[in-house]
Amino acid sequence: MSIVYDYIECPQCGAANQTSELCTDTGAQSFFCTHCGHTQQLAVVQREDGQPPKFDLKSAFGIGTYCIHYVGDVGDWIGAFIELPKDLDDLKQHVEQSRDTIVSAKYTTVNDDMSVTEHILV
Ligand SMILES: [Zn+2]
């Protein structure tokens, strides 16, 4: 299995250099915006009746993301909010309880005009 990465502009918020992945074996594609949390997943569904494959596109509107860098980690933990304000309350509680192991923590929220505001927690 081979994965090809490309860097594209987010179709929701316009952030540049967001990662898009393509599996060259299956044709499946995925996209995640680290600014607004917009996601897209394209699956290729093979048919057994000899018909051409079908494409199944699932898309989620981005409402915000979080990014946490823990002590000793090389990279950051990045995820998308699914349900606000519950996810934001959970993030703030986690950061408060894990403060001794966190180097930095921040999150974004999407504004009505699709711009993104970054908030620093630590
Ligand atoms: Zn975006």
Image (tube, rainbow, N blue to C red):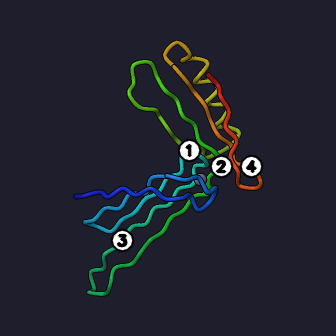
Residue at the disc numbered 2: 63
Q: CA distance from mark 3 to mark 4?
A: 33 Å
Query: Which residue type does callout 1 highlight?
Result: Ala
Q: Specify whether 104 is left or right of 118.
A: left
- What amino acid type is highlighted by mark number 3? Val
Q: Which residue is mark 4?
A: 111
Q: Dot 1, crowdedness within 10 Å: few (<14), some or many (≥20)?
A: many
Q: How far is mark 3 from mark 1, CA to CA?
A: 24 Å
Q: CA distance from mark 2 to mark 4?
A: 9 Å
Q: Residue at left 68%, top 43%?
A: 109
Q: Which quadrant holds the N terminus?
A: bottom left
* The label number, if any, that marks residue 44 in the structure image: 3
Tell me, yes or no, whether the two marked residues, 2 and 1, touch with CB atoms within 8 Å. Answer: yes
Mark with earlier residue (3, 1): 3
Q: Where is residue 4 drawn, in percent x and y?
A: 32, 58
Kindly identify the amino acid type of the residue bearing the numbered disc 4: Asn
- Which is closer to the viewer, label 1 or label 4? 4
